Image (cartoon, grey):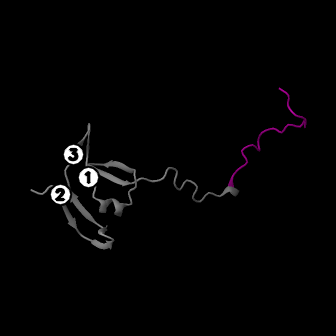
Amino acid sequence: MKKHTLKESSLAYLPSSSNFVRTLTEACMRTVIRKVGNSRGIIIPAAFIATCGFGDEVEIAVSGSKLIIQAAQANRRGWLDGYDPSADVDAFAALPQDDLGEEWSW
């Protein structure tokens, strides 16, 4: 009985020194869920990790009965896209001005 099976729908093999690099466009794999301490885990093949662009961190979400794993996005990525500083409103414009012209003493 095989524990791991891989259905290949589009694999390209590129020679890279002494080993091969796989580029996946679509693949499906059945694997075993293993005990890792008090939790459970799976082994993700290197070809899947390379294709998905995973670094040291991933984002995991649950959608119905599916577990979705995707590459972690940088915090606050894209927050300033389309920002136009000329459209800013002066936040202090409505405050009264000090007409005395002298330094404050505490």
Mark 3 sits on what residue? 34
- Which is nearer the N-term, disc 2 or disc 3? 2
The residue sitting at 85% across, 31% down in the picture is 104
Marker disc for residue 4: 2
Marker disc for residue 77: none
Which span is picked out in magenta?
Answer: 87-106
Front position in the image: 105 or 82: 105
Under circle 2, the secondary element is: loop
Residue 55 lies in what quarter of the image?
Answer: bottom left
Q: How many marks?
A: 3
The residue sitting at 73% across, 48% down in the picture is 90
Front position in the image: 92 or 21: 21
Instruction: Answer left or right for 90 relative to 34.
Output: right
Mark 1 sits on what residue? 43
- Which is nearer the N-term, disc 2 or disc 1? 2
Under circle 1, the secondary element is: loop
Quarter of the figure with the N terminus: bottom left
- Which is nearer the N-term, disc 3 or disc 1? 3
- Whole-number angstrom distance, CA of label 2 to CA of label 3: 13 Å
The residue sitting at 26% across, 38% down in the picture is 37
Instruction: Answer left or right for 68 relative to 92.
Output: left
Q: Residue furthest left?
A: 1
The residue sitting at 29% across, 50% down in the picture is 67
Residue type at mark 1 is Ile
